[in-house]
Image (tube, rainbow, N blue to C red):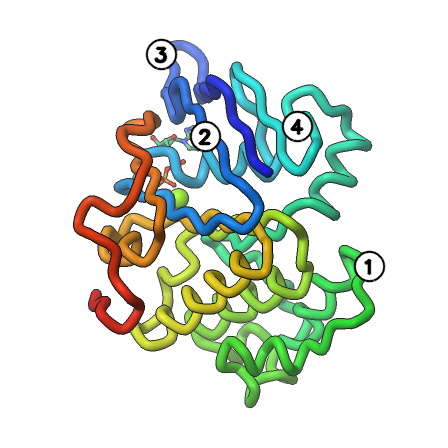
Amino acid sequence: MIELRNISKQFGDGVPIVALADVDLSVDAGEFVVVLGPSGSGKTTLLNMIGALDSPTSGSIVVDGTDVSQAGRKELFEFRRSSVSFIFQSFNIFPGLTAAENVQFGADATGRDDVDPAAILQSVGLGERVDQFPHELSGGEQQRVAIARALATGNPVMLADEPTGELDFITGVQILELLQKQAAEGQAVLVVTHNREISRIADRVVELSSGRIISDGPPAEGKAALEELHW
Ligand SMILES: Nc1ncnc2c1ncn2[C@@H]1O[C@H](COP(=O)(O)OP(=O)(O)O)[C@@H](O)[C@H]1O
Ligand SMILES: [Mg+2]
């Protein structure tokens, strides 16, 4: 579902900042993969490349059958609409829309007419916040609206950038459980985190350091069930 070959990304001119270097990565439909790395290691850059929100300096990216590194604007527009569901590190929910309207927007964007925003908000623990506007919600609640919107789009690839960053432990675990369920239902799910403990719930952890993949396999500390985690 996701196929990256030899991806490099540099920012700036003069002395370039190397954000990604020689990254090879394949993720299948139904896989739940955690990308682990410290701040500045290239995690957000990697997700932006996969979601066609930025383009690599070199290398090829094929996602859901689209050659993202070669596609034209029109093809990329369609790709972003119908192939990827994105949970942004900075939420990017609409301030003028209620929680339910933000979630409905996700469904509308992909043309789904079988989505019940209230039910999805309920699943992320916001059943009581359906008609609230973002400024009336806490940071953690806003993050969950962003997660609910991504769940509503239902595209084959789910990209989640630090989705539990603003959440307390219990809520974070609930969200990770939901994302695992999405993978079990066939979505290719990529979750980015700097938190090694969180990475232990995945069968597969891809570790980034200074823009390079330094390991790709089961968690080094052993796999843990959600209820065994603490952070
Ligand atoms: N638009 C940009 N312009 C210049 N440098 C950038 C830009 N985006 C990211 N970087 C740099 O690329 C590196 C990787 O950043 P990022 O992917 O955001 O890391 P992470 O998400 O792991 O914290 C960092 O050194 C960061 O400062
Ligand atoms: Mg980041």
- The residue labelled by disc 3 is 15
Q: Secondary structure at mark 4?
A: loop
Q: Is residue 76 left or right of residue 34?
A: right
Q: Compared to 11, does 83 lie above or below?
A: below
- The residue labelled by disc 1 is 111
- The residue labelled by disc 2 is 25
Find the distance from the CA under tag 3 to the CA under tag 4.
Answer: 27 Å
Kindly check if marks 1 and 3 are in contact, taking CB atoms under 8 A apart as contact.
no
Of the numbered discs 1 and 4, the one sitting upstream in the chain is: 4
Residue positioned 60% across, 38% down in the render: 1
Find the distance from the CA under tag 1 to the CA under tag 4.
Answer: 22 Å
Query: Which residue type does callout 4 highlight?
Result: Val
Query: Which residue type does callout 3 highlight?
Result: Val
Residue positioned 60% across, 47% down in the render: 157
Residue positioned 50% across, 70% down in the render: 144
Q: Residue furthest top?
A: 14
- The residue labelled by disc 4 is 68
